[in-house]
Image (spheres, helix red, strand yellow):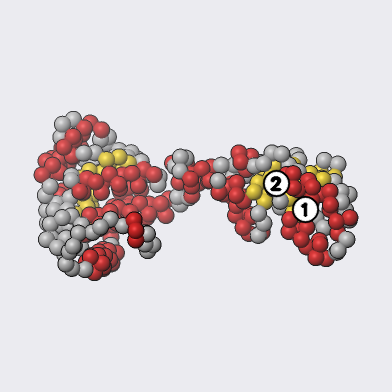
Amino acid sequence: MSVSNAALRPTAPAFTGNPAAYGRDALSSQANALRDLANDLGTEFDDAIALILNCQGRVIVSGMGKSGLVGRKLAATLSSTGTPSFFLHPAEALHGDLGAITPRDVLILISNSGETDEIVRLLPSLISFGNPMIAITTARNTTLSRSAHVALVMPFDKEVCPNNLAPTTSTLLTMALGDAMAVSLMRLRGFRPLDFARFHPGGSLGRKLLTRACDVMHRRVPTVSPQTSVREAIAVMTSGRLGLTVVVDNGKLCGIFTDGDLRRAIERDSQALSHPVEAFMTADPVTVPADCLVSAAEEMMHSHSIHALVVTDANTNVVGILDILDGES
């Protein structure tokens, strides 16, 4: 973990105790709780996932207080990974928002105790609707767990809070279980990076996975003929500022001459500058079509250990140059 400049640190009040030790104890306890949760997953988890996979509508998540905050995160994670979902506040549901539930929806109800008043008051209406209900709780013999079609009862000893009061371990387990559900659904559905990008067009990953070569390529392509001398090719490369020039013969691509080719040429032949560039160019360079995704183009560059690709149109005419830095910008 990096440490900020000591001069910029605020002056801490005097205290007794060891904060880092307290933090390590808390994290160790949380890690053990997560390990117990992982070991406890069984057929109930499978049943819950099956209900969601078979859902023809949306997954509606509800919870109160800290469980509600975790529920909002679960609904957001599900929606962004291919499972349409939204959060329903239990208090608002009691005052008209139950109308948002359709017969095709699956419900996930979160309550640490299984007896949260707002959730329990919802149950008669939800039971009358007949929607499949999944409970996430830490208590088995409760109103919520008995009412749900599937009860995911998490193994839970106590909160890591020194007073065993603030929701800490319980909320961590609930969030982790929700993430486990989302990941399981992604794997079962074959959810791919491109699918993720469709739901995240504003993020850097989304832009990278949806951007095509023609969207970011350099359109002013430095070109020379095969008979151009290496000395003249250097001038073209310098003006092009891409570290390369494309070699074209009668309008057709026949090679590429890069900074690396230039260094190797000089090492091989002290008179290389006066020779034609075709003697040292890379023939049949790697190309990509203009509609190639930048993410796929980057993989090609990494696999061939090159920093640029020639972009061609449907008739194999050179239309641009894609540099590896273009995909990172």
Mark drawn on residue 241:
2
Local crowd at mark 1 within 10 Å, few (<14), some, or many (≥20)?
A: many
Q: Disc 2 residue type?
A: Arg
* Quarter-of-image position of residue 46: bottom left
Residue 275 can be seen, yes or no: yes
Find the residue positioned furthest to the front: 7
Residue 145 can be seen, yes or no: no
Q: Disc 1 residue type?
A: Phe
Residue 202 image position (x, y, % from top left) = 46, 40
In percent of the image, x 62 and y 58: which residue is there?
A: 302
As rendered, which of 326 and 84 lies closer to the eye?
Answer: 326
As rendered, which of 73 and 45 lies closer to the eye?
Answer: 73
Disc 1 and disc 2 in contact, CB within 8 angstroms: no
Label 2: element kind:
loop
**Residue underneath mark 1:** 257
In percent of the image, x 61 and y 41: which residue is there?
A: 216
Residue 173 image position (x, y, % from top left) = 25, 58
In percent of the image, x 84 and y 53: which residue is there?
A: 230
Mark drawn on residue 182:
none
